[in-house]
Amino acid sequence: MTMIVRNLQLVRDRITTACVAAGRDPASVRLLAVSKTFGADAVIDAMSDGQRAFGENYVAEGVEKILALRAWQAAQAGAPAVLEWHCIGPVQSNKTRLVAEHFDWVQSVDRLKTAQRLSEQRPPHLPPLQICLQVNVDGGANKSGAAPEEALALAQEIAQLPRLTLRGLMAIPEPAIDFVAACAVHARTRAIFDQINAAGVLPAPMDTLSMGMTADLEAAIHSGSTMVRVGTAIFGKR
Ligand SMILES: *Cc1c(COP(=O)(O)O)cnc(C)c1O
């Protein structure tokens, strides 16, 4: 067993334990393996243990890895099912086309202009791009993410774009001092999520609350996360 496979299993155990502690079904939380800065070989290693969803922060690096994995899979007899790639880093205007052409999800949309470009540039032969609206839940200065009070209006506008499907919210709060503090900030994201769904203005309710990383996945799951994004605990220090 490789280190990555062993780590993956430990992370799955953490998710299961946190779900049980919170009285939740472990199947209600998805694991996104954040492979940024690691090579295609690390992704292949995680795939060998059934991991299919991967997150990348840097567009050029992500696209390079997506293409490398596609070529590897094409060359492989009986290769596992296709991967699901999530863009989780800032998307500059000049990168939206690359993102729209190669990724399956974008979790880091925080303004309408980016969403409009992604919708216009999503190739017609691909399914709609799956979108999370990133919310700057703790108001960290010069941090990306929409302000909580803009989230409802933005979600409503994004949900109307033809080549996108709004799936949920994503947040990256500042590191908290302890479990209770981490739960408190994640609960605020959860409240925004619930308020938007309760407003009844979306074509379909959002089903994805993307929060929790290596350090705070237990607190995020306690607070209702449906997708944890884990890098370090799987692939090691960057
Ligand atoms: C890097 C990154 C992660 C993973 O963080 P770890 O602490 O290594 O688990 C999750 N989400 C985003 C947006 C990231 O940039």
Image (cartoon, rainbow, N blue to C red):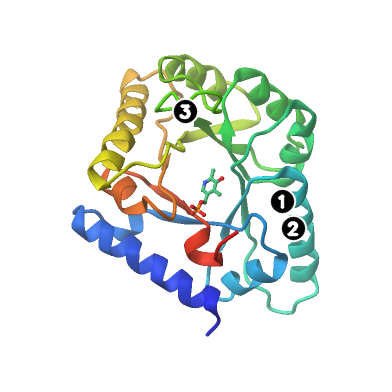
Q: Which residue is mark 1?
A: 62
The Cα atoms of the two marked residues, 2 and 1, are separated by 5 Å
Q: Which image quadrant: the C terminus? A: bottom right
Check contact, mark 2 vs mark 1: CB within 8 A: yes
Q: Left or right? Give the position of 115 relative to 133.
A: right
Classify 223 as above or below 201. Answer: below
Residue 203 position in % (x across, y down): 46, 25
Residue 42 position in % (x across, y down): 64, 69
Q: Left or right? Give the position of 24 relative to 10.
A: left
User: Is ligand 1 less than 8 Å from the beta carbon at label 2?
Assistant: no
Q: Which residue is mark 3?
A: 135
The Cα atoms of the two marked residues, 2 and 3, are separated by 27 Å
Identify the secondary structure beneath mark 1.
Answer: helix
Q: Earlier in the sequence, mark 2 or mark 3?
A: 2
Q: Residue furthest front?
A: 177
Residue 145, label in figure: none
Residue 65, label in figure: 2
The amino acid type found where label 1 is placed reads: Gly
Classify 82 as above or below 165. Answer: below
The amino acid type found where label 3 is placed reads: Val
Q: Left or right? Give the position of 133 relative to 77.
A: left
The amino acid type found where label 2 is placed reads: Lys
Check contact, mark 2 vs mark 3: CB within 8 A: no
The Cα atoms of the two marked residues, 3 and 1, are separated by 22 Å
Q: Residue furthest bottom?
A: 1
Identify the secondary structure beneath mark 3.
Answer: loop
